[in-house]
Amino acid sequence: PGSMKEKSIFIAESEGLQEAQYPIKQMMSEKKLSIAYTSTDPKTGDNVGNQNDIEGPCQFSATSPKEGYHEEVENRCVLLALDESAEQTLQILDMQRKLAAMDQNDLKKIRSEISELYQHVQREMTIKQTINPYSPYLLFSSDNQRMRRDNKKYLIIIELISLLFQRQREKVSKNGVTHVKSHIIDIAIAHFI
């Protein structure tokens, strides 16, 4: 069996993704991918059923020039939209001109420093579990079935924010494992997002 556990899969220009939607949905929901296939037994010549299980979970990122994915994929994901306003385009063009005017060695140094900063932040995140004492009090719309998954995504975003700010958060021990205790500010940030 293969493993995609804790791997990231990046899909550029997802228009050709139609045939892969079912396996992606299965990996997202079941945290594994099961592929059934037949092969010929070399000794008997008979067709034999086989199954290959690929272990997950993994993280998917996909880009698309248009809005709207398949609804079953969308409700398993956090969707980020680009700001396509004229003001944002002007800011991007301005930044591109500034970067083009920079000494390329200076630019490489800045990129290296930013990358190093993110690596340090990652190393400092030693606690991997959270406790959110506010979760029983958080209300989420129940208008349709999609909200079942959206609520879970909302809670995960709060958890990730708590982990990101773990140096500033209270720690609690549960069954010998240290957890980061979510703060009301984490919920406010998640709500803003």
Image: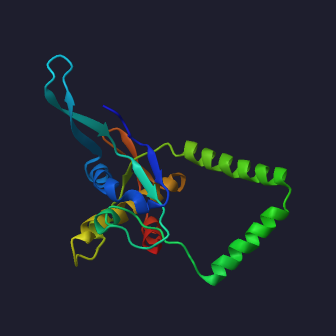
Q: Looking at this rendering, what residue extends furthest in the bottom direction?
A: 86
Q: Looking at this rendering, what residue extends furthest in the top direction?
A: 43
In the depicted structure, whether residue 20 falls above or below residue 99 = above
Q: Position of residue 107 (x, y in %)?
A: 79, 54
**Colour approach in the figure:** rainbow
Q: Position of residue 60 (x, y in %)?
A: 42, 53
- Can residue 15 be seen here? yes
**Viewer-proximal residue among 174 and 39:** 39
Residue at 42 percent of width and 63 percent of height:
15
Q: Position of residue 53 (x, y in %)?
A: 26, 37
In the depicted structure, whether residue 111 falls above or below residue 69 = above
Residue at 24 percent of width and 41 percent of height:
34
Give left or right: position of 111 versus 135: right
Q: Position of residue 89 (x, y in %)?
A: 66, 77
Residue at 35 percent of width and 63 percent of height:
153
Q: How many numbered marks does the figure carry?
A: 0
Give left or right: position of 105 versus 85: right
- Can residue 151 be seen here? no
Give left or right: position of 62 versus 50: right
